[in-house]
Structures are given as structure tokens and as C-alpha cells.
């Protein structure tokens, strides 16, 4: 029997608005416990929520970025349940009339993972366990979230990975969240079921929670898929339940069964009014969205002739692509700019975090200036590379390190002179080359490059040296 | 002359100082406390401090606002910063808010002199003030009767002249019913006219804060002051229509006063008589009486109890002993702690309504109860809209009976719920209504009638009420208690 994995995601993303969804407290991460709180988010008697419109804007941006439809009228609902981290004993969320309907995330294969909807809600506080004691920190309580619910369109772990990565990338691109799974600003719950290949009906699904990295999601899904298959094969039935993933043992275990499932008694929150969104407002927000990674990648490939794998690197984070966009203005070879970024500049931004922030000591206009010097034949690539290193070390512009005399090419006689010099002063290298060590020529070329201050053409120099050696 | 105007005159003409006036109220409160039990917290220091500030203003010749220096009270579910706000529940004994309710912010900035917080049914759930953890508040007309509820303490204090005015809250009649029982005036504003920020929530789509006073004029002054739009309350619109005070004495000739036939069903005989007598008086004043049908009226009570209890069950979920309020002493798990805290902290009526509310929202019952009640609500709103195409205000009884004897209401909760039948439709429709005394039963207990208006029709109902008080002043009988100005 061949089994097929069927999966869908419910992803919670913390929005980077200035203040919480229903009060003026900061959404800043961290802080001493219970210091980013006020009577409203602690749920003191008599307090009332007030919707922060910035949250709606951010959610609309998210919805548009995944091709969803923005509702004209949307409502907030109360999801009632009792837990110490939920100060009002209900979470203000949306059930009956969410903000965004539909949408999709397109994978590199062209397959579209459809979305059911996106809604806004408030986050709960955090429980901190210390020995037998448990403490509650309400700083996170009231931080705005969007919940993105997909259809069960995912059929492989690779698809799942890509879905989460793409979602993360898109949301970061539009600047609504930093989507850090380890910090909890992005949390994924995955629904997994199995069925025989060819079967149309969906199997019973389980929900896996508590995976704080994409790798853990992949591992958890693999484990759960195998568990369900082996359960069915041995004659058992999959029970609908919520599981938590344990990354130490790499297993899933039951959190609660269907019988213990909460009845949330959803009803429309009477303290909040209907959210009305005009089509004008939607258009205004649409106009402020940046070009999204997929589109940008295509543009680099088509318009700038950049190889796809490089385009992917350049568009991975918005700041890199913005840097590239600025550096490439009016330049003859976009690929040169791309190479400098992916080569030398990336070496200075080693971690993913560095690349995301892309705080580079050389500004895009400085890089642009350098590349234009190459374009105008004023300097050669090698000098440019060396200069870029110096620029990266100091943050100063190219012209600080390149003088008039460095610019312009080297005439042929001068080149031959330098080659002769190199051969005369590096007898060992010459000897090695004559004895078959091909690589020894590089030392001689390097010598010429050094003495010409990079002005020599390395390829021509190599030719001349070979001629001289005979 | 209304009480507020009288006090204003006394202060500005220096007949007495604000401190003297305040002290006399405080003294009367103390004297009557054992019998009336209207107050649950007397804020003497705070009151005298404000009174001193007002006297200073007077001595400097500064102008005094109408409400400045006027002593008053707040129902104990209205948040007062630094001052205990208990909702007369064990759950909130000792709880001191860290912020002010918007209405109190407004009044305290106007130097209102807070004498203390007054008694109420626990969490505003009740019709007799008997579910209070501080014991019942007595009716000042006859202390063997209840003051009514849930704003029983305010009505008792005002009726007993131990507060010139007070703010209560009305969810299903909690301002109007005790006003009716105690023979005073009670105004429930249009839903959204007064900010709910700081009012401890019972049923969010019904709750409104409003004044209880001796005269219609006083109610108008207080309403005008507190009916401001508040950004902190998304459901608040404020009062859009200028002030009500300047329109009190408008001629009501030609005004169409409607009586719904269904409203006259199931009343005590003397209540029906008194209301009909009032309609005769209005005819003499030149108004036209129009009879009409409001057949959906009978659905208002069940719809109310379903929706209100549903909202209450959600609003009261936060009382778990973790962040504030009562907490049980010993427990063996978080679940145990929460259960015990709530079982011990809440009284029976509160528990009853939480259970009812949870039930009507639960899976399998939501459609049959809550959803159905909401559509009934829509039908009732429409019925009132239609009624107001035929008349300008609706005249109705406030309660089918007069005050209950102490101990009667609490024995049969559902029977007691049924007495809300006249007040509740108004909350369902979110309309304004003012209750005023219109007679007495054979035991001398006050009978109340309501004037119900269109949304934001406060100036009309207060105008029509004012005219009644001018003409039928014998219904506004004073009691033996308190400060005689």
C-alpha cells in the first residue's frame, strides 16, 4: 500500500506594530516581566479594548501579498477559554467574518498552496515554569497576531518546508513581522493526515504543535506520517487529537484528545464595532507594497540577465535586493554588481541575521561608483576587487584609494617590461613552471598585477609571461 | 428648583460652605446607616478634600460650575482610582482600581464631592439589592421593603436625601426599577450615549451608566455632563443633540405619547391605574395619547436573559484569583485554584447567570438560544422603530409591581426575572428611558412610570418628564431622612 501525506498549516505571526492590538502598550520583545502592560491588556474589571487600526493595515498588507481578498466588512469575536496566560479568559479573535479570504502561496514548482483565510487576533501572555512554581508574564498579552490558515494542499515534507520558508520571506519582505521562529514571532501548527494514494477522501488528521524551527517541522511531520501509516497498517485507527512535538526524542505525544477539546463558545464581541474597509483604502495600501521576492527574482533574471541561483540569493532578503536595486542604477553589467555582492560583501555578512539586516559599510551608491569605473574602462576588475576590500574595511569611497595614475590602462610596452621584471625576480616560480607546475604562473602574474597596481590585464600578462619563459 | 440648582445657589451665595454641606451629608449617612445600608464605603477624607478645594474657589471669587461642590455617590461597580470598588461581591472585596471610570474622571474634574460608594446587587445581577455581599439596602419610604436593584444603594441614598444625586448602571432596568421602588427619578441613556469605560461589565451590549436624582432637572444636568463620546469605549457615541437642560420646559402641546397595549398586561391594578392617570394628565397638558400594539414585547424578556447572561458568562471569566481580587486559600492545582476561587467568591445569583450564559453559548445550543435571541433582538428593535413613526415618546409602567418585601424576591429567581418585563425591552432596543414616580399603592409605596424615547431622544423624554413633575408634584414625596436643604 502506498500512502500519501496530506498536510495543512495554521501559522501565527506576531505583527511588528508600534503598540498592541487593543491598547497602547509597546509590542517590543523582552522587557522585565509585566512591565509592558496596562489595565486593558491585563483585563482589569471595567476596561474595554480599542482596535489599533495599524493592525488592520498590516493584516491587509499580508492578505494582498498572498493574493487574498480583503473583506469589506469584518468582525471581532470572543474565543472563550480559561488559562492563566489569558487575562480576560477569552481571546479576541475572528471566526465569523475574518479580514482576509482565500489567497495562495506559490511554490517554485508552480503549485499553489491555497489559503482558507487570514484573521487577526491578540496573543496571550507567557507562562514561565521554575521548579514546581509557575509564573505568568503578560508582556506578550495583547500583541497583535495574524493567523494564516491554509487548505490541506501540501503533499510532501519538501512542500511543507518551502511553504513555511516562502511565507516567512513574504511577510518579512512587506515588513509586517520579523518572523523569527526561535523567538516565537512566527509559530506553526501543522495538521497531518494520511490516505492511500489515489484516495479522494481525507484521513483523520492530527494537529502537531510546538515546533520552533523549520527543521523540527520537517522532522515532526516525518515522524507523524510514519506513525499514522504504521498505525493503519496494523489495523488501528488514527484518533483526532492535538500532539506536541518533542525535539529531544523526535516523537509526537498527545496533548489532548477530541473529548477534552475546548468548546470556545464563540460570539461576536460586543465591545468592538464592525471593521469597515473601503476599496479605496485597499488600493492605497496596495500601492505601498514592495515588489515581492518571486516577482523580483524573475525581474533580475529577465531584465538583468542574472543567473537564477544568484537572483534567488539577491532576493532572499528585502534589504539585499534593495541594496542591489540601488547599486545597479545605470550600470553596464548588473552581473558585476551581483558578483561583488554575492562574493565579497556576503563574506562580510556571514550569518543569515547579518544578511537580513544587511548593514554593510559600503553604501549602494559607493558600489555603484566603483562598478561604473570598470564600465568606463578606468580600472580593471582586479583593482576593483582589491579596492572593494579596502572600502569594506573603512567605509570610504573608491576614489579614496584609486588615484588618477591608477586609472587608465597599461600600455603594451610597460606591460612587457613588468612581465620581464617578474620573470627575472622570480626564478623559482619560473623553474617550477618549466617543471610542469602549471599553477606557478599565477605567482608571476600576481607579481605583475602588484607592480602595475592592478592596472594590468591579468589574462594578457599571463600570455606574455608564458611567451617570455618559452 | 432642583437639588443641584439649590446647592449651587447655596454655595455661590455663601449660605453655607461646601465643607459644612458635605459634613452634614456625611453625618446623615452615618445616622441612617444601620437602617438603610445604602452606602458600602464612605469616602470622608476624599469628600472633604474636594469640598475644601471648592470653598477655596468660592473665597477667591471664582466661578463655580453647576456640579461643582455638589455631593454625590457612585454605584460600587464604577471604577474609582485608589478607592475600593467591590461590585458588592466577595470576589472584589479590597480591590482598588488603578484608573478612573471615564464618567468619574469627568465629574471629579468638575469637583464633584464623592461621599462614598453605594450598595448594589452583586455584579449588578439582581432586582432587589439582596444579592449584595454587604446585605440589602432598604427602601427609604418603608425599610421593610427593598430598595430594588441592582442600583439599590444609589436609589435609597437619593430617596433618603443622603446624596443629592448618584450614578447607577442599567442593564435590564437596574436604574429605573430601584428609582421606581424608591420614588425617585432614574434615567437610562441611549446605549452609547455615556462611556462604559470603567464600568465593571455585566452585559456589554446592554450596560449604560445613568443618573438617579430627586428631580428631572437634576437628571438632565448630570446627563448633559457625562454624555461625552469617549475614545476608550468603541461603542460610545456621546450625546449628539446639544444639551437637554435648555429644552426641559418646552411646550409639549401636540406631543404624541404612545401607549403599547401589551405594556398594560400583567400589572398590579394600582400600577395600571397610576399609569393611565398619568396619561390623562398629559392629555390636559395638550398631548395626544396614541394606543398601539407591540406584539413582540413578550419576546424581550427571554431574549434579554439569554443574551445578557451569555455576555456576562464571558465578562466574568476573568475572575480567577490570579491577577486581582479574591483567591482561595488552599488548592492543589491551577484548575483547582480557579474553581475554588470562583465557587467561593461568587454568590448564587451570579453563578446561576454564568451557568445559564455558558449553556446558551455552548456547542449544540448556540443556534437554538443565542442566535435565535439575537434575531429576536433585531425584531424588537424594528418594532420600536415602527412605534416611533406613530408617536414621539412611549409611556409605560416601570415595574408591574411596587417594591418587594425583604426576603420575597430572593426565594424565587425566575419569578423575580419576570418583573423585569417592562424595563428590559428598552435595553434590548438600546433606547433611552426615564422612570419617574406617578403614584402610590395602598401601602404608600411608590409607583413608577417610564417615558421611553427614540435613540438619542433624551431631550424629548426629559422634557415630557419635566412637565409631569411640574404638574404632578404630589407624586414626588420627600422622605423623613437625611439633609433638608
Image (spheres, grey):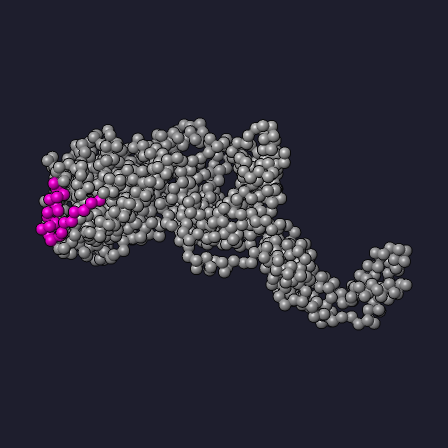
Image point (20%, 54%), residue name: B245
Give x and y (percent) for residue B207: 29, 44
Image point (73%, 69%), residue name: A406
* Residue B80 visible here: no
Q: How many marks?
A: 0
Stretch of the chain drawn in magenta: B273-294
In this view, B81 is above or below A469: above
Image point (74%, 63%), residue name: A382
Give x and y (percent) for residue A175: 53, 54
Frontmost residue, A452 versus A319: A319
Give x and y (percent) for residue A215: 61, 42
- Residue A42 sits in which quadrant? top left
Residue B170 as seen in the image, left or right of residue A348: left
* Residue A445 visible here: yes
Frontmost residue, A292 versus A373: A292
Residue A264 as seen in the image, left or right of residue A13: left
The answer to if B285 sits in the magenta stretch is: yes
Image point (22%, 36%), residue name: B419
Residue A267 as seen in the image, left or right of residue A439: left
- Residue A304 sits in which quadrant? bottom right
The answer to if A218 sits in the magenta stretch is: no
Give x and y (percent) for residue B144: 16, 32
Amino acid at each position: 500500500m502506498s500512502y500519501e501525506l496530506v498536510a495543512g498549516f495554521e501559522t501565527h505571526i506576531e505583527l511588528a506594530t508600534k503598540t498592541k492590538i487593543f491598547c497602547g502598550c509597546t509590542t517590543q520583545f523582552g522587557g522585565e516581566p509585566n512591565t509592558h502592560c496596562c489595565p486593558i491588556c491585563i483585563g482589569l474589571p471595567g476596561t474595554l479594548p480599542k482596535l489599533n487600526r495599524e493592525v488592520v493595515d498590516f493584516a491587509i498588507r499580508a492578505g494582498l501579498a498572498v493574493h487574498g481578498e480583503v473583506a469589506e466588512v469584518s468582525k471581532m469575536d470572543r474565543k472563550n477559554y480559561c488559562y492563566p496566560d489569558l487575562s480576560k479568559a477569552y481571546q479576541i479573535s475572528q471566526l465569523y467574518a475574518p479580514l482576509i479570504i482565500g489567497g495562495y502561496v506559490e511554490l517554485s514548482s508552480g503549485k499553489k498552496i491555497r489559503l482558507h483565510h487570514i484573521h487577526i487576533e491578540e496573543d496571550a501572555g507567557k507562562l514561565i515554569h521554575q521548579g514546581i512554581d509557575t509564573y505568568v508574564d503578560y508582556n506578550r498579552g495583547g500583541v497583535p497576531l495574524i493567523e494564516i490558515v491554509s487548505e490541506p494542499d501540501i503533499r510532501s515534507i519538501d512542500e511543507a518546508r518551502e511553504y513555511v520558508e516562502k511565507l516567512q520571506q513574504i511577510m518579512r519582505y512587506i515588513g509586517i513581522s520579523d518572523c523569527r521562529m526561535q523567538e516565537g514571532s512566527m509559530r506553526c501548527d501543522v495538521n497531518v493526515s494520511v490516505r492511500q494514494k489515489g484516495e479522494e477522501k481525507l484521513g483523520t488528521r492530527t494537529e502537531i504543535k510546538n515546533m520552533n524551527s523549520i527543521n523540527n517541522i520537517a522532522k515532526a511531520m516525518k515522524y507523524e506520517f510514519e506513525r499514522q501509516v504504521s498505525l493503519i497498517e496494523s489495523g488501528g485507527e488514527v484518533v483526532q487529537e492535538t500532539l506536541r512535538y518533542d525535539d529531544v526524542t523526535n516523537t509526537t505525544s498527545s496533548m489532548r484528545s477530541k473529548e477534552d477539546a475546548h468548546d470556545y463558545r464563540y460570539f461576536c464581541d460586543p465591545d468592538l464595532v464592525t471593521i469597515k474597509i473601503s476599496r479605496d483604502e485597499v488600493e492605497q495600501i496596495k500601492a505601498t507594497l514592495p515588489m515581492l521576492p518571486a516577482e523580483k527574482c524573475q525581474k533580475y533574471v529577465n531584465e538583468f540577465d542574472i543567473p537564477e541561483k544568484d537572483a534567488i540569493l539577491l532576493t532572499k532578503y528585502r534589504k539585499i535586493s534593495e541594496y542591489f536595486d540601488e547599486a545597479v542604477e545605470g550600470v553596464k553589467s548588473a552581473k558585476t554588481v551581483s558578483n561583488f555582492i554575492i562574493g565579497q560583501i556576503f563574506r562580510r555578512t556571514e550569518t543569515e541575521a547579518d544578511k537580513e539586516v544587511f548593514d554593510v559599510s559600503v553604501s549602494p551608491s559607493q558600489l555603484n561608483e566603483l562598478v561604473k569605473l570598470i564600465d568606463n574602462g578606468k580600472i580593471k576588475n582586479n583593482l576593483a576587487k582589491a579596492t572593494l576590500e579596502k572600502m569594506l574595511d573603512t567605509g570610504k569611497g573608491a576614489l579614496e584609494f584609486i588615484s588618477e595614475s591608477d586609472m587608465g590602462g597599461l600600455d603594451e610596452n610597460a606591460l612587457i617590461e613588468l612581465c620581464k621584471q617578474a620573470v627575472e625576480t622570480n626564478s623559482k616560480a619560473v623553474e617550477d613552471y618549466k617543471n610542469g607546475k602549471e599553477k606557478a604562473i599565477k605567482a608571476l602574474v600576481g607579481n605583475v598585477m602588484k607592480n602595475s597596481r592592478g592596472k594590468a590585464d591579468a589574462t594578457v600578462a599571463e600570455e606574455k609571461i608564458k611567451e617570455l619563459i618559452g | 428648583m432642583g437639588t443641584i440648582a439649590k446647592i449651587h445657589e447655596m454655595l455661590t451665595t455663601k449660605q453655607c460652605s461646601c465643607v459644612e454641606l458635605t459634613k452634614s451629608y456625611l453625618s446623615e449617612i452615618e445616622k441612617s446607616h444601620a437602617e438603610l445600608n445604602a452606602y458600602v464605603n464612605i469616602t470622608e477624607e476624599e469628600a472633604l478634600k474636594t469640598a475644601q478645594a471648592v470653598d477655596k474657589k468660592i473665597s477667591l471669587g471664582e466661578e463655580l460650575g453647576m456640579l461643582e461642590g455638589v455631593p454625590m455617590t457612585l454605584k460600587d461597580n464604577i471604577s474609582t482610582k485608589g478607592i475600593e470598588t467591590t461590585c458588592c461581591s466577595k470576589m472584589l472585596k479590597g480591590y482598588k482600581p488603578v484608573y478612573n471610570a471615564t464618567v468619574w474622571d469627568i465629574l471629579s474634574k468638575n469637583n464633584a464631592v464623592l461621599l462614598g460608594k453605594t450598595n448594589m446587587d452583586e455584579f449588578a445581577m439582581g432586582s432587589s439589592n439582596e444579592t449584595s455581599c454587604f446585605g440589602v439596602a432598604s427602601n427609604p419610604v418603608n425599610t421593610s421593603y427593598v430598595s430594588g436593584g441592582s442600583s439599590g444603594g444609589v436609589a435609597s441614598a437619593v430617596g433618603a436625601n443622603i446624596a443629592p444625586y448618584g450614578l447607577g448602571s442599567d442593564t435590564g432596568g437596574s436604574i429605573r426599577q430601584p428609582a421606581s421602588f424608591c420614588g425617585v427619578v432614574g434615567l437610562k441613556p441611549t446605549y452609547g450615549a455615556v462611556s462604559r469605560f470603567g464600568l465593571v461589565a455585566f452585559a456589554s451590549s446592554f450596560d449604560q451608566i445613568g443618573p438617579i436624582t430627586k428631580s428631572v432637572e437634576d437628571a438632565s444636568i448630570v446627563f448633559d455632563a457625562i454624555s461625552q463620546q469617549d475614545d476608550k469605549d468603541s461603542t460610545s457615541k456621546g450625546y449628539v443633540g446639544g444639551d437637554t437642560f435648555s429644552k426641559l420646559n418646552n411646550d409639549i402641546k401636540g406631543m404624541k405619547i404612545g401607549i403599547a397595549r401589551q405594556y398594560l398586561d400583567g400589572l398590579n391594578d394600582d400600577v395600571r391605574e397610576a399609569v393611565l392617570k398619568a396619561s390623562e394628565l398629559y392629555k390636559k397638558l395638550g398631548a395626544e395619547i396614541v394606543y398601539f400594539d407591540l406584539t413582540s414585547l413578550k419576546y424581550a424578556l427571554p431574549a434579554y436573559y439569554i443574551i445578557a447572561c451569555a455576555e456576562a458568562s464571558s465578562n466574568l471569566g476573568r475572575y480567577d484569583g490570579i491577577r486581582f481580587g479574591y483567591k482561595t486559600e488552599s488548592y492543589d492545582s491551577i484548575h483547582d485554584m480557579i474553581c475554588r476561587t470562583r465557587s467561593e467568591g461568587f454568590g448564587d445569583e451570579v453563578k446561576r447567570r454564568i451557568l445559564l450564559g455558558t449553556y446558551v453559548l455552548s456547542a449544540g445550543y448556540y443556534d437554538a438560544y443565542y442566535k435565535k435571541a439575537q434575531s429576536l433582538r433585531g425584531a424588537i428593535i424594528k418594532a420600536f422603530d415602527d412605534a416611533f413613526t406613530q408617536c414621539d415618546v412611549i409611556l409605560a409602567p416601570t415595574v408591574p409591581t411596587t417594591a418587594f418585601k425583604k426576603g420575597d424576591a430572593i426565594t424565587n429567581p425566575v419569578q423575580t426575572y419576570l418583573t423585569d418585563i417592562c424595563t428590559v425591552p428598552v435595553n434590548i432596543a438600546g433606547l433611552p428611558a426615564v422612570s419617574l414616580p406617578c403614584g402610590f399603592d395602598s401601602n404608600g409605596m411608590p409607583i413608577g412610570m417610564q417615558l421611553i424615547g427614540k435613540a438619542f431622544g433624551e431631550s424629548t423624554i426629559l422634557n415630557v418628564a419635566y412637565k409631569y413633575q411640574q404638574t404632578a408634584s404630589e407624586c414626588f414625596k420627600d422622605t423623613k431622612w437625611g439633609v433638608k436643604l
